[in-house]
Image (cartoon, grey):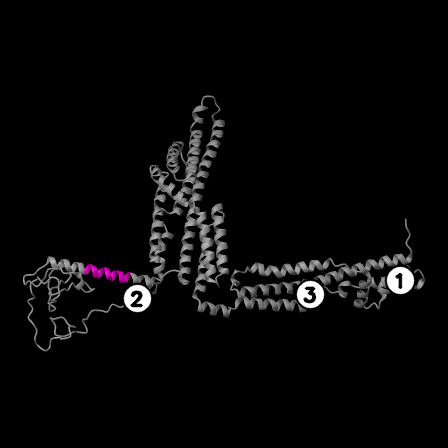
Amino acid sequence: MTMLSPAATYHAELRQQLETVGRAISLQRGLTWLARGLAAGTIIVLGLIVWAWTHDAVSGLSIPLLVAIPVFAAIAVAIGSLFIRHNSPELARRIDRAAGLQERSTTALELGRRGEEFPLALAQMRDAVEHLRRVDMLDAFPPRLPRKELLAAFFVGVIAAIVALSPNPWLLQARASNPSITIAREQAERVQRVADSLPQNESPDIDALRQLVSQGAQTMQARSNEPDAALNALQDLEEQVQQMSAGDDQLAAALAAVASALSGNQNTQALSDAINTGDMRQVSQAASDLAKSMANLSPQDRQQLAQVLRDAASKAGSESQGVASNLSAAADALQASAAAAGDPSQANQANGQQADASGAQGAQSAQAAQAASDAMNQLSQSAAAADARQRTASQLESSRNALERALGRTQSRSGNNNTSGSSANRSSSSSQASNGDQSGSQSQDSTGQSQSGDQPSGGGDQNGAGQQGDQSGTGNDTGTGGGYSTGGDPQSLNNNGSPSQLDAVTDPQQDQSGGAAPDVSSTNPYTSDAGSGSAQTAPESVQPSYSNKPTQGNDSGSIPLGLRDLVKDYFSSLDQK
């Protein structure tokens, strides 16, 4: 047993009291740095919001993340401050100052460190220890949060909220001057809605597609202030979706090949009807319903269904090995299930073990039926994934077309209409001139006013009146052959027709300028032909939903799957004209 001297005893007790002081100071310092970390975190959040505000990406910021940043910063800084070590002289000075001990702790600590044993030193150390015992550390070092740091964090947070909610005037001005920015944002939101509409945890393919489309929508949103960059991101996303859809054509072809084979059984009739509609969503639902109903089929129905699925698998083999494998696996499992369910009652009836064997065979039959259901569920998931990719590709194509039109990458529809209108006018004129020639040659009334229509078409006007020389054809389908003379053309190649029977007009009222027809005295300004103006307007201006009509059918099941590409190519060719 070691006996300590009085000086060493007082010194040890003094250091123990100073450790209590250190813990109180650590608590107070931890709260102080907690508030400072909170203020620092709000400053970081303000910086992020300002950056997003300048780049029009505030809506893409995660609110939980913005809240977690200052909280995490405050906790991390507070915990870090607890690891700061204290030294005894500093603790003695702080407790003397906080508790008003008039340097008792500092003096006693120095005397104990020297090991002074004279009575005055021992009395000094004993007095310091007694005063430290009576000090309430929480009163000397109150654990409260500093007000300045909290106010700073509050005001910085308010400023961050104001910046996040206020619109950016420079971006608004840029959008007003460049409407394609607004269109890019709208299309990014539509792509995001497509990603959100895809079911979660249904199949790995759909989950991968959902993640890919969501990331692409976020990229488009981030680049919406630069429509060209947003269009590039959309095209990259569209190419990736097309790569994922590489096997969809084979799936559709295989399903089309097996539709006739499935129509001969009542259990697969619904699946055959769904395939004939061309809607992959209906195909997926019908396949899922068939998988659920397999467990309730009788052994005989399972045998028949297995034969139907096996025939369908043989027809699908040339188009898609995946579909053929699913159908073949389902057929084999159904065959095994039917065999297991049908044999036990006959095989074990004589030996008295029917109950146990039936139970074992029943379990085996249930497992086989479950395997058949799993195989059909795989086919259902494949169809559902194909439907999701088709709907996604349709929306991406629609968004790309809208962005390209906004950026002027394709010829406007009004220009196309002008071109097609001119072509139609030319075709109409040619048709009318041809009809005029035919009616002139084929019709002749009793007065002999119709002339032979074998004159060159060079003298006919663009409206197809077919006037030539001293004869004309009206170009009407009625074939009346009525006409009038324009005075004759001495240079005409064919003047063999009978002369007109119209009387010559010698009255001064006759129009001498040639602007009026010979059978009228003057030109009536209210019955003249309409001008051939080229002013046209885009169909979107008359009916805003015009541009959406060509692609609406592809989003529904009204167009068979095999004809969707043909319809899409047709309307795409209209945009290229």
Q: Look at 34% across and 52% down and name the residue there.
A: 567
Q: Secondary structure at mark 2?
A: loop
466 sits left or right of 64 in the view: left
Which comes sooner in the sequence, label 3 or label 2? 3
420 sits left or right of 400 in the view: left
**What is the C-alpha distance between the residues marked 3 and 2?**
73 Å
Q: Residue furthest right?
A: 118
Q: Look at 50% across and 51% down and name the residue there.
A: 211
The question of residue 426 being in magenta is answered with yes
Q: Of residues 347 and 549, which is closer to you in this image?
A: 549
Which comes sooner in the sequence, label 1 or label 3? 1
Q: Which region of the structure is painted magenta?
A: 420-432
Residue 539 visible in the shown view: no
Q: Which mark is residue 536?
A: 2
Q: Nearer the viewer, mark 3 or mark 2?
A: 2
> Which residue is tagged 1?
111
Q: Nearer the viewer, mark 1 or mark 2?
A: 2
User: Which amino acid type corresponds to the residue marked 3 in the rendered image?
Assistant: Leu
* Residue 230 x, y percent position in the rendering: 47, 59
113 sits left or right of 192 in the view: right
> Which residue is tagged 3?
145
Q: Of residues 324 and 365, which is closer to you in this image?
A: 324
Q: Secondary structure at mark 3?
A: loop
Q: Of residues 335 and 496, which is closer to you in this image?
A: 496
**Callout 3: few (<14), some (14-19), or many (20+) C-alpha neighbours within 10 Å?**
some
The answer to which quarter of the image holds residue 398 is: bottom left
Counting labels gives 3
The question of residue 488 being in magenta is answered with no
Which comes sooner in the sequence, label 1 or label 2? 1
The answer to which quarter of the image holds residue 524 is: bottom left
